[in-house]
Image (spheres, grey):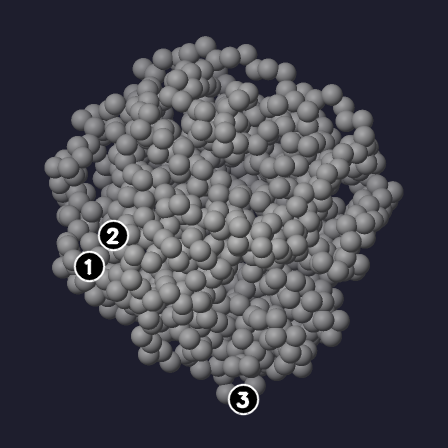
């Protein structure tokens, strides 16, 4: 059990300082005493077949969230089958030895849920959020999928057709185009460079490949079952034992974790032409720390000051002051073995250059000057509070635990994020900002009217390339 | 089942009640009113040291003035642009530095402002909400800024997107005849550009009054103590007369309506179908909600199974009752059941529609099987509970229900109402409402790539 608490003095300090630039309303009540967050207590077990079980009993709200995580996502796809994991996740719930696709969907609906099957870079997750009175029904389906997914030929054929058409449709979405391009720009042909399948990889994929990749990744000794919600641990454990005991690991080697990639992306602008665009979709990406690295939390604080919150510098500047965009935002993408500092903004064509200029300015301002004490305290306090809020959601806790497991981190880390944030010093934030935020470290993807982009961004003197 | 106290200062706690199947979930909740008409709904939740609050005002896009489409939403942005006491930037800075988040949302039938934060920030948040219920900055400069921001919002969500949300923005405009129901809540740029600071004053004076609002708070507190705080901060906000509600009801639809649109950005065709629905307070409306979910909810749904799997004429199907609003139980005026279907270029609109009509005809003839109905009840119960899980989200549900009904009962009674819907209900409903004369169809066709035109557009 982890307890988090923040000192009230920090907060009052922040308020006092804030009065120097923008005074707070004189009648505004001060914040009340802090109450400490009780982080979810995780009961850990391992079954004889090696399956990791993490249970968080949480009585009251009558639902249970399950997540089964296995090692190996997009980064584990065969070199000649980029994005193969998408086809794998689209078909894993389309039939088992016992059940048709329709039965799977109906059984889970009867339990109050849907099978959610998603691939991230380092893992695949099967999840379902169901009524607590129907946990046995839901677990039966999940266990059947994990052990017996059969990838029927006709379902694979249909999924290949539909994913190909879906890809054609997604390729008209500017944010999809930007995400796909920035991954390629930053990571090249490395395992983290793939964001989606291609028409070719979908066309070439065969049911037999799905079955063999499924066997390679879905094995109990490299999987974790996470459950949170309204149940008793002992009852849930015996239920899980009953459903998953017959699942056995093969002798073949499991998916290996991705090695830390050595990358040095170009400081350049990569253009994705999109005729008839009324906005330019700007995406900036720079190598950053991933979770587990020592300066990850300090970088999170720096990012919150820079562009991660509504009252951050970037949002205040290009939205609330200049009105260039509705959606500016900055966040840290954190894979198991690499991290990316991202800034995204969709701006109307006419202010493409002006927005670009302000974004570079805010990055370099972070890299060259220290945030004020007010900014520093507000950012920390915000990150700690948001963690407390999000951990109230069963799905969020299940997702967070799955993420920790994927990184090889223990479940106790779930309460540690806020504690680490609270302990960060201003010097650490300054150091992280200086190290990661120089605009010269970023690669840029611009999706929109090519002529608009070329003209608007020419003054910056950066190389302009077609996106890879 | 429940007793709702609407009497002034009368206080009642409802404890958690479990029904026979262990499913009925009803957190302790209470309702009170201030003398100025502000309705306050409080629900204690001691699972974490946080709080969520939501103020819903009884004004949405539906009732915004003619010639000012999009104004309710633009006005929502102005609520974050400061007051004389708390200038622009203060609101979000205080809430975020208190460890929380803040946002607003404009629906057809309400506008909601909500926050979630550690409970230590509750006093500050209540003060800020009361402050902007008393007056605003009414700054022309800030209006100009937010006009730009809103236009970027429309660009990013509509104009620069394939399909441009036509199935929720354009379909109601074609399906309904009266301005309140038949205009875009995002608004035309011409109307947004015409909006001035006098409009902001007028709208605020007409609709932003304590007697036209419901404040719901959920979290780790004592309800009595929090009610005292609400009194302290809100009691001196003056009540205002609000305009009488116009008659927004539509004359019955006489014939099927159809239109075709070209889409410059999409590469794959799509189809949207909207049926007019019965009024919210009728049993038929609950049946409509269930029917909508039977047809659209997930891979087990009728339309997914029929169109995507069996006949393979569609890539995806989504939809339901009040898809263009806050879902099948929260609305206060004419709504549609909408189906949005994306289909492969190799199929024709006629093929898709024929498969769709066959699925509707089957439901109309036989109704759902009892097992199917039981499954969708479980799914709807579970989905509805998810609405109520996080404090800010439960506060939203409580404030919407109370705004429409004067009692929060519906925020908890939906699962029970859904469980009363029968096989015959669905069959009868489908035969009565899901008929061609009651529907509108928009066919969205990708515009063929034209390189010359694309180059011209760039200039």
Question: Dot 3: few (<14), some (14–19), or many (≥20) neighbours within 10 Å?
Answer: few
Q: Which residue is mark 3?
A: A252
Indicate the quadrant where residue A331 lies: bottom left
Question: Dot 2: few (<14), some (14–19), or many (≥20) neighbours within 10 Å?
Answer: many
Disc 2 is placed on an element classified as: helix
Measuring 67% from the left and 43% from the top, which residue is drawn there? B261
Q: Which mark is residue A367?
A: 1
List x then y, in percent, for residue B248: 63, 20
Q: Nearer the viewer, mark 3 or mark 2?
A: 2
Quarter of the image with the N terminus of chain A in it: bottom left
Q: Answer with mark 1 or mark 2, whichever residue precedes in sequence.
A: 2
Q: CA distance from mark 3 to mark 2?
A: 50 Å
Q: Answer with mark 3 or mark 2, whichever residue precedes in sequence.
A: 3
Q: Nearer the viewer, mark 1 or mark 3?
A: 1
Q: Which residue is mark 2?
A: A362
Question: Dot 1: few (<14), some (14–19), or many (≥20) neighbours within 10 Å?
Answer: many
From what the image shows, is residue B292 above or below residue B130? Answer: below
Mark 1–mark 2 contact, CB under 8 Å? no
């Amino acid at each position: 059990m982890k307890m988090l608490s923040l000192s009230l003095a920090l907060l009052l300090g922040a308020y006092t300082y804030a009065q120097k630039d923008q005074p707070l309303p004189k009648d505004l009540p001060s914040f009340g005493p802090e109450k400490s967050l009780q982080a979810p207590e995780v009961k850990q077990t391992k079954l004889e077949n090696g399956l990791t079980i993490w249970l968080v009993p949480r009585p009251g709200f009558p639902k249970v969230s399950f997540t089964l995580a296995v090692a190996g996502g997009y980064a584990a796809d065969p070199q000649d089958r980029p994005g193969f994991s998408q086809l794998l996740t689209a078909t894993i719930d389309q039939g088992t030895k016992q059940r048709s696709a329709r039965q799977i969907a109906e059984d889970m609906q009867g339990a109050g849920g849907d099978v959610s099957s998603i691939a991230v870079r380092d893992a695949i997750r099967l999840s379902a959020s169901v009524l607590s009175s129907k946990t046995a029904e839901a677990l039966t389906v999940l266990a059947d999928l994990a052990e017996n997914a059969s990838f029927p030929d006709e379902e694979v054929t249909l999924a290949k057709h539909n994913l190909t058409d879906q890809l054609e449709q997604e390729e008209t979405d500017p944010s999809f185009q930007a995400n796909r391009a920035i991954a390629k720009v930053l990571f090249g042909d490395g395992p983290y460079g793939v964001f989606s399948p291609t028409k070719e990889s979908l066309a070439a994929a065969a049911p037999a490949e799905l079955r063999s990749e499924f066997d390679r990744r879905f094995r109990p000794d490299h999987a974790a079952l996470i459950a949170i919600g309204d149940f008793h641990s002992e009852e849930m454990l015996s239920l899980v034992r009953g459903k998953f005991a017959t699942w056995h690991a093969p002798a073949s080697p499991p998916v290996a974790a991705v090695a830390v990639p050595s990358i040095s992306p170009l400081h350049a602008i990569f253009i994705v032409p999109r005729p008839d665009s009324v906005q330019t979709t700007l995406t900036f990406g720079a190598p950053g720390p991933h979770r587990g690295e020592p300066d990850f939390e300090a970088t999170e604080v720096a990012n919150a000051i820079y562009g991660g919150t509504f009252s951050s510098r970037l949002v205040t500047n290009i939205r609330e002051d200049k009105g260039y965009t509705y959606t500016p935002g900055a966040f840290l993408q954190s894979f198991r073995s690499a991290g990316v500092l991202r800034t995204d903004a969709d701006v109307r064509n006419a202010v493409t250059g002006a927005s670009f200029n302000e974004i570079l300015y805010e990055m370099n301002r972070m890299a060259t000057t220290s945030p004020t004490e007010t900014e520093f305290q507000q950012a920390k306090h915000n990150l700690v509070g948001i963690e407390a809020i999000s951990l109230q959601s069963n799905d969020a806790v299940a997702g967070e635990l799955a993420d920790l497991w994927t990184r090889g981190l223990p479940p106790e880390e779930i309460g540690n994020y806020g504690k680490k944030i609270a302990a960060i010093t201003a010097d650490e934030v300054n150091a992280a900002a200086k190290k990661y935020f120089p605009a010269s470290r970023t690669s840029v993807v611009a999706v929109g009217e090519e002529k608009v982009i070329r003209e608007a961004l020419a003054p910056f003197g950066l190389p302009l390339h077609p996106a890879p | 089942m429940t007793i709702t106290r609407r009497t002034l200062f009368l206080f009642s706690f409802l404890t958690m009640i479990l029904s026979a199947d262990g499913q009925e979930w009803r957190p302790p909740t209470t309702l009170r009113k201030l003398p100025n008409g502000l309705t306050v709904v409080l629900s204690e939740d001691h699972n974490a040291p946080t709080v969520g609050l939501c103020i819903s005002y009884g004004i949405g896009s539906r009732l915004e003035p003619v010639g000012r489409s999009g104004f309710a939403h633009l006005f929502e942005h102005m609520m974050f642009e400061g007051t004389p006491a708390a200038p622009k930037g203060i609101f979000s800075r205080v809430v975020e530095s208190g460890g929380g988040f803040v946002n607003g949302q404009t629906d057809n039938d309400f506008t909601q402002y909500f926050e979630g934060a550690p409970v230590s920030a509750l006093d500050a948040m209540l003060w800020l909400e009361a402050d902007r219920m008393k007056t605003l900055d009414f700054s022309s400069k800030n209006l100009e800024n937010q006009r730009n921001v809103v236009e970027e919002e429309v660009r990013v969500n509509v104009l620069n997107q394939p399909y441009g949300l036509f199935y929720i923005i354009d379909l109601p405009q074609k399906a309904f005849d009266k301005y309140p129901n038949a205009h875009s809540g995002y608004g035309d740029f011409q109307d947004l550009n015409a909006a001035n600071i006098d409009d902001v004053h007028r709208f605020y004076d007409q609709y932003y009054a304590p007697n036209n609002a419901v404040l719901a708070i959920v979290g780790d507190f004592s309800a009595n103590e929090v009610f005292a705080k609400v009194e302290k901060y809100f009691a001196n906000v003056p009540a205002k007369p609000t305009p009488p509600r116009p008659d927004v009801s539509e004359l019955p639809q006489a014939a099927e309506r159809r239109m075709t649109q070209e889409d410059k950005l999409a590469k794959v065709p799509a189809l949207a179908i909207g049926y007019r629905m019965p009024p919210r307070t009728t049993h038929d409306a609950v049946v409509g909600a269930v029917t909508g979910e039977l047809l659209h909810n997930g891979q087990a749904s009728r339309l997914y199974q029929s169109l995507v799997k069996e006949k393979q004429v569609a890539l995806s199907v989504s939809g339901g009752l009040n898809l263009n609003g806050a879902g099948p139980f929260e609305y206060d005026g004419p709504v549609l059941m909408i189906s949005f279907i994306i289909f492969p270029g190799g199929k024709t609109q006629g093929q898709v529609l024929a498969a769709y009509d066959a699925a509707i005809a089957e439901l109309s003839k036989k109704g759902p099987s009892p097992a199917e109905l039981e499954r969708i009840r479980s799914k709807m119960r579970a989905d509805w509970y998810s609405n109520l899980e996080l404090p800010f989200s439960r506060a939203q549900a409580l404030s919407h229900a109370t705004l429409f009904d004067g009692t929060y009962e519906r925020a908890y009674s939906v699962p029970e109402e859904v469980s009363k819907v029968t096989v015959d209900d669905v069959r009868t409903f489908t035969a009565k409402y899901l008929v061609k004369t009651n529907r509108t169809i928009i066919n969205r066709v990708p515009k063929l790539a034209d390189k010359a035109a694309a180059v011209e557009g760039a200039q």
